[in-house]
Structures are given as C-alpha cells and as structure tokens.
Image (cartoon, rainbow, N blue to C red):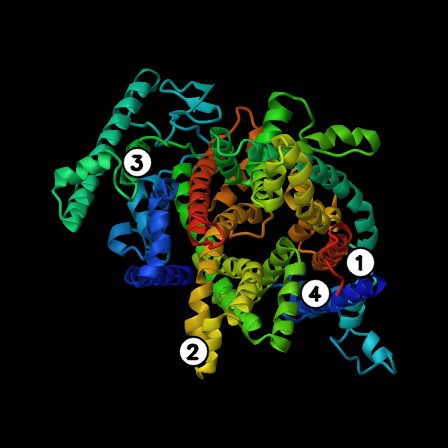
Amino acid sequence: MIFFWTDTLFFMLLLMLAATIIRTRRKEHLRRPWRKVARSKSAMVSLTVLIFYFGFAVLDSVHFHPSEGQSGAGKFKTEAMSLLDWWASPLRQRVEKTYSAPFATIGYAREAIRDTNGVSRWAYPRLQYGGIHLTDPENGKTRDILQTGLKGLLHGFLAWLGLVVLLISYRARLAGMSIQQCGVEITQGRTEIPWRAMFITLLLILLVSFGLGELSLKYHVFGTDKVGEDVFFQSLKSIRTGLLIGTLTTFITLPLALVLGIMAGYFRGWVDDIIQYLYTTLNSIPGVLLIAASMLLMQAYMARHEDEFASLALRADFRLLFLCMILGLTSWTGLCRLLRAETLKLREMEYVQAARALGVHQGNILFHHILPNVFHLVLISVALDFSSLVLAEAVLSYVNIGVDPTTESWGNMINSARLEMAREPVVWWSLSAAFVFMFALVLSANLFADAVRDAFDPRRVE
Amino acid sequence: MIQYLIRRILYAVPLLVGVNIITFVLFFVVNSPDDMARMHLGQKRVTTEAIAKWKHERGYDLPMFKNDKAEGINQFTETIFYQKSVGLFLFRFGRADNGEDIGADISQRMWPSLAIAAPTLLVGLLVHVSLALMLVFFRMTYLEFWGVALCVALMSISSMFYIIGGQFLMGKLLQLTPISGYDLGLNALKFLALPVIISVIAGIGSGVRWYRTLFLEEVEKDYVRTARAKGLSETTVLFTHVLKNAMIPILTGVVVVLPMLFIGSLITESFFSIPGLGSYTIDAINKQDFAIVRAMVFLGSALYILGLLLTDISYTLVDPRVRLN
C-alpha cells in the first residue's frame, strides 16, 4: 500500500463525512432538514448515482505496488497501481495502435496488409484486441454483441436482485415488519424515503455497468483514442480526478471561510476591516487569471525541485493537489462573505447576548453558539460549488493550467479530442464518453445540491 | 453625490494596491527572475551568462526594492518593484518576452473581445430574461417544472461541449457560418454570429434560473398582490410591476460585468480564434510569458474594481431608497 497526498486527503475527507453523518444521526434538530432531503425523489436518485461515482473514486484511490510475481517484469515495480487499475487490467492493457470506433473490429485507418500469399493490399487491419475472438466479424458481430450484452444485463439484474433483497430484509428488520410487507410498501411507493425510485435507479446503473463491463472485455465499448488506449477505461479513471477536484478544495475553502468569516462578523471593528479588505482584493482578481498565474509558478517550482518529484505519478499527484488548493484559494471569498453577514446577525441575537452576559468564554460562544448556526450555509455552498468545480476542471485543462497531461481527466479527454472533430470520419467517441460521464455526475450533483439548499435554507418556507 | 463618488474612488485605491502587491509577490518573490530565465532558456544546460543576459534584456536584473548603487530617489525607482509594479497603476505594462509592447497589444486586442462580449451580454440578457418571465408567467404548471428541469440539465453541460457541438453542427454539418476566425469591419459579423449564439445558449441554464429566482422573490411581495387584487391582468402585473422592480438587481448585475467585457472570454476566443484579450492571455500562458499574464491579472482586477464602483453608482441612480452614507 502506498498513499499519495491526494489519497490521504480524500480518505480523511470521507472519514470526516462519516463522522458528521454519525453525529447528525444522534441529534434530532440536525436530522430534520436531512429528512426533508431524503423525502425528495430527485435528491435520492442523484444520491444513488453519486454514491456509485464515489465508489469508483475510492477504488481508484487505493494505490499499491504490484508485487513482482504478479507483473512479472521489473518494469512495473516502480509504478504504483490503484485497485481500479488492477481490477480493469484487461481494459488497461489492451492498447491498440491508434483510433478505433466503438465496438469496432477493424482499425480506423487503412494500411498495407500482407496476406498469406505475400501480396500486400491497402485495407483496414483487424484490431489487436477489439473483437479478436470473432472469426467472421462482419456477420457474427451484432449477434455476439447482443449475446454478450444480454449476459451482462442478466448479471446486472441478478446483482440488483441480491442487493435489493438484502436492503429490503435489513429495512424490514429495522422497522419490525415482514419482508413481504416491506416489499409491498416499496413497490407501491408508500415509503417516506423514495426507495422505489432509488431501486429503479440502482437497477439502471447496474444494468448499464454490468452490460458495459461484460462487453468491454471483448470490445472497446467507447472506442480507443489516438494512442490506442481504451476510452471507457479513461473515463472511469477520470471519475477520481473530477471528484477530487470537487471535494478536496473544501480543505482550503472551509477553514479559511469559517475562521475569517466568523471572526469578521463577530469581532467587527478593525478585524472586520482587514478581513473584508482581504477578500475583496482576492475577489477582484479574475479567478482564471489567478489560477493561471499560480499554475505557471508551480511549474517553475517543480522544475526547480525536480529531484523531489522522482516519479511521474508523484508529479501528477502534486499538480492535482496544487490545483485543488489554488481553486480553494480563489473560491472561499463568497462563502466568507455569507458567513460574515450571518454572524453579524447572530451576534445580536438574544441567546448570544445572554451567553455573553453570563460570562461564557468568547471561544465557547464562537464554537457552541455561532458555529453550529452558520453550518447550514457551509453545507449549501459546498454542495453548490461541487458541480461548478467539476466543470471548471475541464476548462482549466483546456487552457493547459489544469491537471497534469498524464492524469486521466475529462478535461484532458476533451482537450485531446476536440481537434478530432475535423477528421474524416469524425472521431466522436472520446468527446461523447467524457460528455456522458461528466453530465451524469454534474447533473446529479446539481439536483442533490438543490435539494440540500431547499432543505437547509431557512428563507425557503415549507 | 460628488463626495460619495470621491469616497468610493478612494476606497478602490487600497484594493488596487493590494492586487498589485499580490501579483508582485506571486511573480517576483515566490519565483525569482532567475527561475523565469531558466524556464525559458531550458532547465539544465544553461550558463549564468545566458541568464544574466536574459534578465538584462527584460530589465529583471535590478534589485527587488532598494538599489544601493543608485543615488537619491533613484534608489527606489531603479528597482524591480518600481519598474514592473508601480508602472501598472499608470497602465504602463512594459514589454512582452518577445519584445512587443504589451500596452499597444492590449489596446488593439480589446476591440475584438468587446465585439464578442457586448452582443453576447445584450442578446443573452434579452433571451434569458424573457425565458425567465415566461417560466414565472406559467408558474405552478408542468411547463414550469419541465422548464426548470431543462435549465438544470443545460447547466450541467460543460461550456466546452456547447462550443464543440455548435461548431460541429453550424460550421461543419450545416455550413452556415465559418467555424472560426475573425475579420475587420462588417465582415466580422459572420464570424461573430456563431460565438455569440453559442455563448447565449450556453448561458441559458444558469441565466434563466437566476432571473427566475429574482422574479419569484418579487412576485411574492405585497404590492404585487395589491395590483392583482385591484383587478390587473397577470400580464400587466408581470410586465409593468414585477419586471420593473426586478430590473434593479438585473441592471446592477449587468453593470458590474460591463468593464470586464474588454477582457473577453478565454475559451470562447481561443476556440473561435478571435484575436482578443482572452486568446492573448491563453497564448501568454502557453508561452509562459509572465509579463503578459501579470499585466492581464492587473488589468482584469482593475476593471473588476471599476465594475464594483459603477455598480455602487448605478444603485444610487436607479434606486432612490439607497442613501449615500
């Protein structure tokens, strides 16, 4: 096992999330808004999708050095591998020569092929891996795709059935009713949490992923890119990058915004002036330009300290982390301003005044009376920022100030594929794959964030 | 009023100083000019003479803050800080790494940026506000539900896909407009159409949602109920009462971005190869030209602060309830 910086931070974040959930479960007043979120169909459906994405990100964040026995050659010894890499080895290793369309069995470009008689002719070569098991690709392909796909769908359905039975029986035991009763309730949609919608989403996800998974063992389901790598595999790897950028940024934004915002609102006076000056100044520098400047500086820094970043993976990891930090530095100001305004309001409230009159220590007031009451703002802003951060990554990668070019990310996929639209025939698959994966993530994040905002924003009446 | 204006302008000065200091620290303290020279000349096999020459050509071979060799006031003017940073206040941007005058480049390139950004803003405002009004008009119906759902979906698409998709559809399949490029005078129109249309469409999701919340806030207010109660039709209420009052936040939101129109959009300009400031910045980033990036950071911030200033002023003009102290 080895831990990259981003891995460690990501797991820390997940632990913190788990701790928050456990804490929230115990307190009724914290549970109430969440229950409202749980009642929303769109939120729970999105949550299912998000959990699925997070699962992939977690798989891709557990890195280890494959032992020499497994990889055979010493070449792999220095290269760290994630669980996802290991799991999807067939996808990772089957690299074609260059582009190939989804489900293709023949190459993208014609080349000179020498047949058995030694005569060379100009034709499309068979792919090295895609559909190699077929003897007669022209006739057998559709049938084979259908067969394999159906097999995958069946597996997906079985997996879903198992999961659902497990979940229902767990829920039935918790609620103290029979499994049958519980099942009927869910199918009729009478439960408080929209289990039926969630189960349907789960079914769709499992069907699609098992179907694609089964097919991807034989074909390149989303084709291959310029250097022949499987696009499906790239898209899966990009999930981690996207999620990390969306979440790790909070490590910078939250401490800065919370400490400075609450201090400015609570202490007022010169503290307030300084903090306001600080965030107005930072805010007036256009975000992209500040990020660009910082990334340029980081490149110079990495060039100066070349020996500290021995491996390519380490470099890429550092760059990803730095990008998260910079994005955090440019995006805390909005939340800080909100927190300041809210604290200004709260400090005049009677309960805070009472605490002060009773001689409660200032730190205690801040921690126990102010902080819990501004936390809904933090939650809303984190949820709302997530999707815009994922989208920002794509744009930044296009401007070459995003993640390392060797890191798989949707931005890099778009960037390397955008010129291919001019080719004939059009190479559309990289773009479409990035589009589908990004759209699903951002859409569910948006829907979930909306539900969170509706539930936690006190200005919105029920 | 004059007094208020002067106070607001004076307030902008420390902000600009702050921005200046941040850029100075980022570009000269965190990274010394030696590092920049090495980045340009190659990392390893580079002689100290070459670095010294590179620095001298660009005026980076001066001391940071205080020049002991010079005399009198020159002790402070012949320094990197004075030469490179203070000049920014007078919009003297110095020279780029290839020796061109950045100021001249900027004044030439800001017009194409404006030619894209201004119509985008106007058309976008018109389209987004009318769509939002329509959603509010049909509130509590299926039309609203699906409209809002569509907005969320549109919001979830990366702007790059709008551009790539639009270029592919309009430029390649339908061949209505050129895919990219720019021309002077009236010829520019055909090049501008596609980027403007795409930018407006890409902004529909967030724009319409934002204006809709503004209208919805207004629709709940008492004066609207009064207007309805005295028998005005829903259209009159919406267009004369709600729209007029919601115009205050809308207009001030527009005013704040007005100066920024000169800066242009980074990705739109580079995708459509429009010779504006956005593509200028991107080229500079790719060439790792620190001087240009520094100038653009300062210019962008200055324009943003100008926008804030204009917003404050427009508030006092539009909304008589705002007092000037």
Using the image as rendered, state which of residue B160 and residue A69 is in the foreground: B160
- Which label is found at residue A364? 2
Alpha carbon separation for disc pair 3 and 2: 53 Å
Asked if marks 3 and 2 fall on the same chain, the answer is yes
Q: Residues within 10 Å of mark 2 (few under 14, many from 20)?
A: few
Q: Which amino acid does the dot numbered 4 rest on?
A: Val
Tag 3 and tag 4 share a subunit? no
Q: Which one is in front in this view, the residue at disc 3 or the one at disc 2?
A: 2
Disc 4 is placed on an element classified as helix
Q: Which residue is mark 1?
A: B95
Q: Amino acid at mark 3?
A: Gly
- Chain under numbered label 1: B
Question: How far separated are the C-alphas under marks 4 and 1?
Answer: 20 Å
Q: Chain of mark 4?
A: B
Residue A56 visible in the shown view: no
Give the CA separation, mark 1 to mark 2: 55 Å
Q: Residue furthest front?
A: B230
Left or right: A190, with B145 as reference point: left
Q: CA distance from mark 1 to mark 3?
A: 55 Å
State how far apart marks 3 and 4 are (Cα). Answer: 51 Å
- Residue A223, given in percent of the width and then of the height, sits at 42, 32
Q: SS at mark 1?
A: loop
The amino acid at mark 1 is Arg
Disc on the earlier residue, 3 or 2: 3
Which mark identifies residue B19? 4
**Mark 1 Cα within 10 Å, few/some/many (few <14, many 20+)?**
some
Residue farthest toward the top in the current orientation of the protein: A139
Q: Which mark is residue A213?
A: 3
Report the amino acid beneath label 2: Asn
Closer mark to the observer between disc 3 and disc 4: 4
